[in-house]
Image: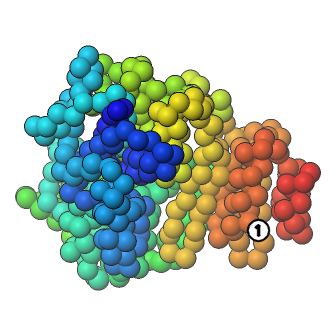
Amino acid sequence: MSKVVVVGAGQAAASLVARLRSRGFEGTITLLGDEPVPPYQRPPLSKAYLLGEMEEDRLYLRPASYYPENGIDLHVNARAIAIDRPERRVVAEGQTFDYDHLVLCTGSLPRHLPAAIGGALDGVYTVRTLADVDRMCPACQPGARVLVVGGGYIGLEAAAVCAKLGLTVTLVEAADRILQRVAAPETSARFRALHKSHGVDLREGTGLTRLIGDTRVTGAELADGSTLEVDFVIVGVGITPATDLADAAGLEIRNGISVDSHGRTSDPAIWAAGDCASFPYAGLVSDGRIRLESVGNAIDMGELVADNIMGAERGYKAKPWFWSDQYDVKLQIAGLNTGYDNIVTRTEGETLSHWYFKGDTLLAVDAMNDSRAYMVGKRLIEAGKSPEKSAVSDPATNLKTLLKA
């Protein structure tokens, strides 16, 4: 009987094991997670859960009972520490698990501030795991002063929640503008105005020099020479793929665990999916490979690997999409804007969308409270169609007609 062992218990892993069972896989499935809870959603951590609008059990992707009921041997608090490739065996916290197929769904890790500038002080938090947010929640009291370091989506979402909870929020971004790595200046401008309208002291082009405090953070010194008094700090300066286990096992690493179009690593008995995996991508990327950090990618890759373990030999065709909720604005993103050279803006009432083109080719869409623009843009990109720019920008254009052109 075939044995599948999955390391990591996030969205990719949960999607993979569910897919195996739903497709009739009859072998054994072992799921190893290093946290004390079943697989859960991460996006609500920095939004609904931090706001107190979602209970822990609603975070769970499936009820805890699902796993034993479906013959999935879930081990929590079971951190995998080594892979014995010749013996096809995983070592996790003193136990060993034999496999015919091993799947690495190890996800990603938050970047931390260096200890030399105060990153190890009490009161400095990241937002990646349930435990991270549980540690931070008691500090999120009305009137408390919080410094958010980093103007990407995690930092901005955390700033929005803190502002809604009545905290005094300062956000610093070392780059010239927020969202510089992932969005056009036009999208950055929309969210800059949004945060300032909610009282966030947003400082772009301003880095953090050091945090101040003996054992707990009490202040911050910024690169412009100013100082702030703070009660706690949220660090949102990006994530890195969790590749240590794969690297130690001698697997190929290229901006993540390198896999082929079927999800196989350099060892044909080992697969990888989700944030930790980089895969071939025919889009506008420098080396023909990409790694996507999104729920959609985790689900799609997890299901792909499950199908291929069962012999489908299906190639992965990524359909990138992302979202972010901040205050009353829902940002939905379709496609990848890498290589764009012009932006077409569409406004229709209270909705706004930015359409990224390279020449006449549509690459991506940022839609703000405009689900129609998102869905039409997504379908156009997936079909390889590019609409006329004048039609996109004209609010009189019924977007659905673009699909028929």
Q: Quadrant of residue 402?
A: bottom right
Q: Which residue is mark 1?
A: 347
Residue 135 appears anywhere in the view: yes
Residue 345: percent from the left, percent from the top? 76, 59
For residue 394, above or below residue 200: above
Residue 253: percent from the left, percent from the top? 39, 24
Query: Is 345 left, or right, of 144 in this rendering?
Result: right
Query: Is 278 left, or right, of 114 in this rendering?
Result: right
Which residue appears at 39% of the width and 62% of the height? 62
Q: How is the image coloured?
A: rainbow
Which residue appears at 20% of the width and 57% of the height? 36
Q: Residue furthest top?
A: 86
Q: Quadrant of residue 333?
A: bottom right
Q: Quadrant of residue 59?
A: bottom left
Which of the image's four quarters has the N terminus? top left
Disc 1 residue type (three-letter): Thr
| Secondary structure under the numbered disc 1 in the rendered image | strand
Q: Nearer the viewer, residue 305 or 309?
A: 309
Residue 391: percent from the left, percent from the top? 89, 57
